[in-house]
Amino acid sequence: MKALNNLVLRRTSTYFAGIALSVFFFERGFDLATDTFFRSYNKGKLWDDIKDKYEQ
């Protein structure tokens, strides 16, 4: 905990940068996880799965 305090929490600019990076990576991970869940839950019903039947 002391190392975290010395590296990130001591200055406002590094604290803000740490929060911004954490939010960015959380958002990317959450988006990937929910998209993967949606695609697996709706497999066979999405356009990517059925487009071969309708394209000429």
Image (tube, rainbow, N blue to C red):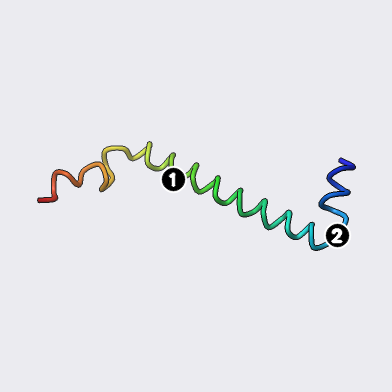
Cα distance between the residues tagged 1 and 2:
36 Å
For the point 37% across and 37% down, which residue is it?
41
Q: Secondary structure at mark 1?
A: helix
Residue positioned 87% across, 48% down in the render: 5
Which amino acid is tagged 1? Answer: Asp
> Quadrant of residue 24 in the image?
bottom right
The N terminus lies in quadrant: top right
User: What is the x, y in percent for residue 43?
Assistant: 31, 37
Q: Amino acid at mark 2?
A: Arg
19 displayed left or right of 48: right
Lateral position of residue 56 relative to residue 33, left or right: left
In the rendered image, the vertical position of residue 20 relative to residue 34, given as above or below: below
Badge 2, how many Cα within 10 Å: few under 14, some, many 20+? few
Q: Is residue 21 above or below residue 50?
A: below
Residue that sits furthest to the bottom in the current view: 13
**Labelled disc at residue 35:** 1
In this rendering, the label closer to the viewer, 1 or 2: 2
Residue at the disc numbered 2: 11
